[in-house]
Amino acid sequence: MEDIRDIVREKYGHIAKTKTSCCGPALPCCGTDKGASDVSKEVGYSDEELRSVPNDANLGLGCGNPTALAALQAGEVVVDLGAGGGMDCFLAAKKVGETGRVIGVDMTPDMVSLARKNAAKVDAGNVEFRLGEIENLPVADNTADIIISNCVINLSPDKKRVFEEACRILTPGGRMMVSDIVLLNPLPDEIKKSIDAYVGCVAGALLKEDYLDAIRSVGFESVCVMEEQQFSVVGSDDPFVKSLAETFNLSEEQLEGIASSIVSVKVNAEKGAIPY
């Protein structure tokens, strides 16, 4: 697990320093002309939302827009697991207002540094960023009214632990809204073993039902998939998917199966009203 964390930390540290993402399919260094803004619009962000945050906050790393369905209210405390450059934190901060608070957690020092610089650019006084692993959140028990996360939990080698921590820091009756990558069918073994694919949000993904079961197993209630769609930047003609075919000598049928098996889901869950 530590080896995987170190590799993910190194890769995302590079992204934070260069503002160039190659963590997933159809991104600039993977051989396409799509930029971060194009990718973000494809997964659910509006032009208005993208204009409202610093350019460096949007690194094109998401697979959805968790703030769009989170029904955030003024005065709420939000914790973002894997905050990256801070985009979702800044969008959440506008919705919870001055009486609310947003805490972004990321395990990559360079990402935390970037996010803090972005916060200073927009004078986000109700947002703070903390260095820490999402499996061991630097947040006190019963702190958050809502947890959000965007295409990050799939990178963790211990997803059940992440959901345990999420449950711990939520207030009784609190909720979780995450966008993430899951699989409809198992990936070929050679893909599953690829660290590059793991960092690219592919090999680390669980089967959809296993992902939902992991959330339920730690005590979350009313677990519901609110939206599901094929990961829009994945296709059999995508440069990333083509590179998988060349690297692992996959047939056209296997290639199409991989592309159709990777989906983006938005999952809502609630913590019971009994104190943790």
Image (spheres, rainbow, N blue to C red):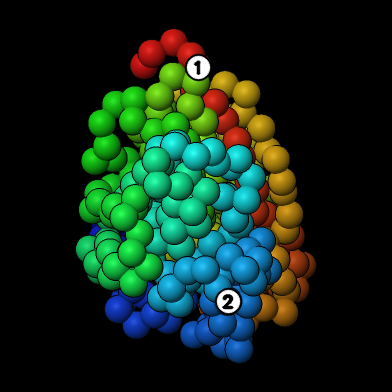
Q: Nearer the viewer, residue 262 or 67?
A: 67
205 w.r.t. 174: above or below: below
Quadrant of residue 209 within the rendered picture: top right
55 w.r.t. 74: above or below: below
On the rendered image, what quadrant is the C terminus found in? top left
Q: Nearer the viewer, residue 52 or 214?
A: 52
Q: Is residue 246 visible?
A: no
Mark 2 neighbour density, 10 Å: few (under 14) some (14–19) many (20 or more): some
Spot occupied by residue 54 in the image (x, y as percentages of width and height): 43, 73
Identified by mark 1, the residue type is Gly
Spot occupied by residue 180 in the image (x, y as percentages of width and height): 56, 51
For numbered disc 2, what is the local secondary structure?
Answer: helix
Location of mark 1 (residue) = 272
Q: Residue at x 60, y 40 (%)?
A: 71
Spot occupied by residue 113 in the image (x, y as percentages of width and height): 24, 67
**In this figure, what is the number of numbered marks?**
2
Identified by mark 2, the residue type is Ser
Give left or right: position of 256 versus 131: right
Q: Residue at x 62, y 28 (%)?
A: 223
Q: Residue at x 66, y 61 (%)?
A: 44
Residue found farthest to the top: 274
Location of mark 2 (residue) = 37
Q: Nearer the viewer, residue 89 or 190?
A: 89
